[in-house]
Image (tube, rainbow, N blue to C red):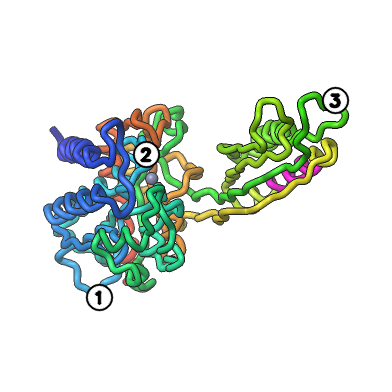
Amino acid sequence: MTDSGSAAARVLARADELAEHSARTDGIERSYLTPQHTRVNAISAAWMREAGLRSWPDAAGNQCGRRTIDDDDKPALLLGSHLDTVPGAGRYDGILGVLVAIEVADRLRDVDLPFALEVVAFGDEEGTRFGATLLGSRALAGSWNDAWLDLQDTDGVTLREAATTFGLIPENIHTAARPRHSLVGYLECHIEQGPRLEALDRALGVVTTIAAAERRMLSFRGEARHCATPWELRHDALLGASEAIVAIERIARDQGSPATVGRIRVEPDAVNVIPGFAEWSLDLRDGTAAGRDATWGLIRHELHRIAVERGLDLEVTSTHVAPEAPCAPHLRDAVAAGIGSTGDADPVELVSIAGHDAMAMAELTEIGMLFVRCKGGISHHADESVREEDVAVAIDALEAAVRHLAAQHAAEQG
Ligand SMILES: [Zn+2]
């Protein structure tokens, strides 16, 4: 077996091992500040030490590692991703990026680099337990908000209580923030969570940007009436919402902006009453915030038209806004050079529709991302699958990307 082959086999075996640390037996579920989080941190700390890193948990429960040969004051290139999962998860989303980073650190353990090399395993990216996402990476990036300490999980446990049980000091979580000058950049390897690499028959891709997103709750208020009410007197909020949701699909497809309506609720929710109220969610994304907002403008125009036609009142509440997070040109170049070194001379460039820790990290430092093909583009599901040979080239490509950056830095420093 080649070195890359054995490293890839080890990554897959480790992903299998981490998958056993789950809050349930009928699938993988591992969320922030749980006993499973404690265990995977301890396991990944041991793997980091084997790879020549010293390892420590930060004030937010992220497990960090840094090469023992690196001086304390040297700014670091940070490699990483997350170890938490959604309920019913696969075994590679996030996890693969941490394990590949550890392999790369192992290969570079004695290599003289112009920057320090660190690995991070973020404790929360998915936001499964407390609703707010990217808690681990936002703490490290310096955008932690103490108001989140009052968020509750479905059992009524606050983040403050969970952090204390985990062994953290809730009031100190914000001290996980890294000073800007302590990093030279952040590189993340992640499964694609889409089918494009597979369709193009490529193992790896360069991420150009992480899409801008906005989530809204939309509602129509009409009149709840007996089902004997004639058509011309009805103001049916659910019929309005139905027409709106189909229009959202049509407009978003035309504009190339991924849009998802994943939740709908009606009142009074009775079989023989015309719905007087319907509320639904809209998650709208695009490669740029301007593109996202242009698509929203067209959707809003259509919603107003439907409201007037059906005699309904429209209400719109924005619940989450994220700008696009572009990858830095020199880190894109490094990732492309890394992929190039594996024999793919013209790497595919992709926009990441999914959000990642790199989005939070973009507020602190420059980011770059490497995508790895996953079977059928399936993710957030037990069927998530990667090929061993793809993992092997991902390790090679990330290592080569780090070496490329090192050469670039050395050249700049003269
Ligand atoms: Zn992920």
- Tell me which corner region of the image, top left, top right, bottom left or bottom right, holds residue 140: bottom left
Q: Residue at x 56, y 54 (%)?
A: 320
Q: Residues within 10 Å of mark 3 (few under 14, many from 20)?
A: few
Measured as percent of width and height from the top left, residue 403 is found at: 27, 55
Magenta residues, start to end: 295-304
Compared to 215, does 405 lie above or below? below
Q: Residue 275, can we see it?
A: yes
Q: What numbered label is drawn on residue 230? A: 3
Q: Decide if residue 74 is on the left or right side of residue 279.
A: left
Q: Which residue is mark 2?
A: 87
Mark 3 / mark 2, whichever is N-terminal: 2
Residue nearest the observer in this picture, 147 or 199: 147
Q: Is residue 297 highlighted in magenta?
A: yes
Mark found first going from the N terminus, 1 or 3: 1
Label at residue 73: 1
Q: Is residue 315 magenta?
A: no
Q: Position of residue 112 (x, y in %)?
A: 19, 63
- Does 197 sit above or below residue 184? above
